[in-house]
Image (cartoon, grey):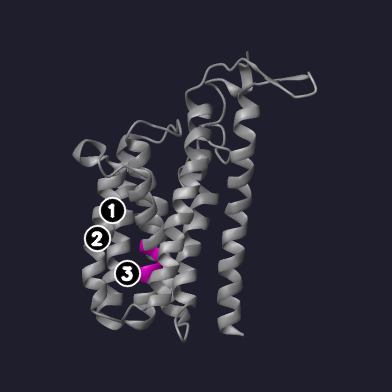
Amino acid sequence: MSDGPDGPEARPAFYALSPGGWRDYWSLLHPPYTLWHLSYVAIGAALAPRLEVGWWLETTAAFFLAMGVAAHALDELNGRPLRTRIPRGVLIGLAVVGLAGALAIGVHGAMAATPWIWALMPIGVFLVVAYNLELVGGWFHSDLWFALAWGGFPVVVAYVAQTGTLNLAAALAAAGCVAMSVAQRALSTPVRTIRRHVTGVSGSISMDDGSTEPIDAGTLRHPPESALRLLSISVPLIAAAMVVAKLV
């Protein structure tokens, strides 16, 4: 049986720091995952015939505020999954400021780039609130809605902000990022369960040569978590390569 570092006192995520002070805000931002999903913005923008750096940066900032700040603040408000000590009022304030900032950027984009942003903004607000507050009995809090909100939607918004339209290439990229996000959830869900809820694991694996290997929480957690760590690096690198190829 495994306790100690794999028990309930383990970090709730591989990127989470010990609770308290500024470390709580680092954990709240989910840095590897936030960078991963902001990379979908870069992918959508880089698919445009001509990459407008200003609109790409604005779209990235809007998704950082909506997802990286507001969505994660609401998620922590709903059950403290990261075990931070950030006061409830501060979390609410971060959610409000994050959404307000994202909407302000969206209004600028709708007025200066394309009016299609007007239609996309309420969808974004709905996705943040419905998913993270688990509205309608948690119906929207599913792997599919996560993938649509933070996988496909960033690609679509980024491409529309660049071009004012949507084409087959952007739709295919959005579908690919949805699938990637579903795969992310397939890996991260058991890892979260082990880190946050499992108090002990016992058992062994029997090999065909007659040997046995013990099983503990680390045995179960390590393979999917290693894949998540690598994907949180590889996806941003691919997105960066697409942007660089467009600019140079």
Residue 156 magenta-drawn?
yes
Secondary element at tag 3: helix
Label pair 1/2, CB-CB below 8 angstroms: yes
- Dominant SS of magenta comes to helix
Query: In the image, which residues are magenta?
Result: 153-157
Graded by Cα atoms within 10 Å as few (under 14), some (14 to 19) or many (20 or more), the crowding at tag 1 reads many
Residue 176 placement (x, y as % from top left): 46, 62
Mark 1 vs mark 2, CA separation in Å: 6 Å
Q: Amino acid at mark 2?
A: Ile
Residue 12 placement (x, y as % from top left): 51, 32
Residue 247 placement (x, y as % from top left): 57, 83
Left or right position of 102 against 183: left
Residue in front for this viewpoint, 53 or 137: 137
Mark 1 vs mark 3, CA separation in Å: 17 Å
Mark number for residue 127?
A: 1
Dot 3 corresponds to which residue?
105
The answer to whether residue 119 of the structure is visible from this angle is yes
Residue in front for this viewpoint, 208 or 84: 208
Q: Is residue 186 above or below residue 238?
A: above
Dot 2 corresponds to which residue?
123
Q: Amino acid at mark 3?
A: Ile
* Residue at (59, 69) in percent of width and height: 240
Front disc: 2 or 3: 2
* Residue at (57, 74) in percent of width and height: 242
Residue 38 placement (x, y as % from top left): 47, 61
Left or right position of 28 against 95: right
